[in-house]
Amino acid sequence: MPKSIRIAIISPLFISAMLGVTCLHISINASEITGKAEERTPSFFDFGDFDYSKKLLRLYDENKLLNVKSYPVLRRLVAKRIAREMESQWVAQWGDRTRDFPKWLEAHPELLETFFIALNEQYDDIGNCFKLLKKMGTEHPELVERNPELAIAIAVVWDREDNRIFGDCGALHYRAIPPKEPKCDAMDNFLYYSSEAAPFHARLKLLPYDFLTYIVCNPVSKEDRKWVWKHYGKKKTMLGMSYEDPPFVVEHNDVTKSGVYATTLIGIPYTLENIRKRGTVCSGRADYAAAVCRSVGVPIFHCWGFGHYWVKWVEFDQVTPKKITFTIKDAGWRLKEDKDFIAHTISPQTGREENDTDFTLYLARAARDLTAYRHSELLTRCYNHIANDLDLPLEKRLDLLLKINAMSPSNVKVWEKIARFGSAHGSKNQFQKQHIKQVKKLFAQMIDEFMYAPNALPGLAMEMLDFPDLEKDDKGKTKKEMLLSLFEKLDAKNRPDLIFETAIVYSQQLDRRERYEEQFQLLAPLLLKYYDERIHAEKVLNRLENIAEKDAEHFGEKLLVLYRTYLTKLTQNPPEKGREVPQPFQLSTLDRAKKVFERSKRNDLVLMVDNTKAKIEKDKKQGEADFSRWIDEKQKENPYIKIGVTK
């Protein structure tokens, strides 16, 4: 039989047999692969043989830890560690991992893992966070699936309904009464902000929970929200300027002397409509603007300083899946008048005080690159674990910190660790030569990174100047020259408060080394240049007087000359443009100077002080009389005395 025919006859049987074997072989391999995959990625809630340290160090050894592409792996690792530590708490709310809700969460790993890393173990009511997430997920699973970051923001903000962020100034400052309509709660806010009918919903879906926490902390009633949409719904930009819409009220009577800021709302429901209609002072205006912005999906910060309230808000330029650009705007900030250089506010998640540097830095980092930002934050949490477990030498610890920071610059926690190398490790010559060049660049790099939000710089700068081997920077500048370069940049940002804060700490270091001349040369020019910066003047004068006491022969006359020049600047009339000094501060400083002059038996200077004080006190009494007369005239015209602009 021809060979070709023989093959044709036996081929069907041969193929059939081979297919069977082949199918069986493939089936076995698939089973093996599935088994290995399950072994590599077990259930999130299965902690049986979970070894966090081993897995973390393996990532480091394999050079994967610092790769942003490894973020999902690191996120799951850290989230699982947190879940294991909190197991009793989530089981109490969700049931064990065999229950429906944990299973549903496992089907949405990004939501599940991001939720766990978002929890703040120190300040959050963890049990209520779990409870809120379950309530949203079981009652509105489709909304949570579409708005995971929103659900997380609601859970971490509304876990404590006594959070200070939910307070208002109505009862405290104005003796107003609560509105008839109840305030909105967590679920009201979740449904409100997840509604696809809301004009702002498309943008909110693109925002991470870091931004959303400053929106969803909004307890105002549904009626107030309707009122906001009626009056502000068509306005797309600069909504924080609504701060200026309620008339500014000035009152001068026995009631306001007792601590009530304004009487326009006594016994009146504290609603947005009433605030807008009747007028109020700064705290009520801040409440008003915060409610307006949050009701239309704008992150806003209710701020305070020295006896004053104002707002800062996020003005979005662009919000896309890959990019968020924004600026921080403010309304009502009285920088020049009251020296409110730092804006204090409340963190919606923790209920703790933070300042404008805090929220500006982390929102900017989240907006620049969300994945890199979150990866950097997780690495910051892991740093001590890696450094200590592997007993890394100093230069490798520094390398690790710098790489973490490079991933998402302006990481305050990382820079704190970098700066503390000086106090933590002390002596010189611990770094290898190839690292000293790197060390010398750090001071200038740190200043550049934080200059747009510089409140953290004084503390960081002083610790950085103690850094081992940092006698000079890479440009050859000495420590004093580095400090002066910082002062120049802070002066350009109009931040004399931070200049003084840094200089005072540095002078304390000089004092311990008995370097008095350097202290005097550092502080005296600053006092004369920023003579109207009254908040820090007393501390500077204390140090200068202390130096003069230690060496009266050398510094006694210098102190007298300084005081005379300083008083001339302080009491000049008319004052330098934009540099008017309050009369109480002028008088208290004159009293202080008089004691110094009396101790030095300089009767001529004592007489100069007495004459200057008499003139200021006369002007002060005349000004108070003029103001009272103006108030009385205005009260006859209008019992509320409404003034249309903020002072």
Image (spheres, helix red, strand yellow):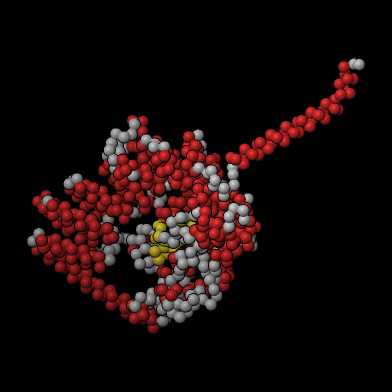
Residue 130 picture quarter: bottom right
> Can residue 522 be seen from the camera position used here?
no
52 or 322: nearer the viewer? 52
Residue 588 picture quarter: bottom left
- The correct choice, above or below, for 49 with respect to 526 in the image is above
> For the C terminus, which image quadrant?
bottom left
643 or 446: nearer the viewer? 446
Q: Residue furthest bottom?
A: 636
Q: Position of residue 570 (x, y in %)?
A: 23, 61
> For the N terminus, which image quadrant?
top right
Left or right, 99 with reference to 174: right
Q: Residue at x 63, y 56 (%)?
A: 100
Q: Position of residue 494 (x, y in %)?
A: 34, 54
Q: Residue furthest right?
A: 1
Q: Residue furthest front?
A: 48
Q: Total of numbered circles in the picture?
A: 0
Q: Residue at x 31, y 78 (%)?
A: 628
Left or right, 161 with reference to 94: left
Q: Position of residue 91 (x, y in %)?
A: 55, 57
226 or 177: nearer the viewer? 177
Q: Residue at x 54, y 73 (%)?
A: 182
> Can residue 359 be seen from the camera position used here?
yes
Q: Position of residue 516 (x, y in %)?
A: 17, 48
Left or right, 509 with reference to 6: left
115 or 371: nearer the viewer? 115
Residue 249 picture quarter: bottom left
Left or right, 49 with reference to 450: right
Q: Residue at x 79, y 28 (%)?
A: 18
Q: Residue furthest top?
A: 2
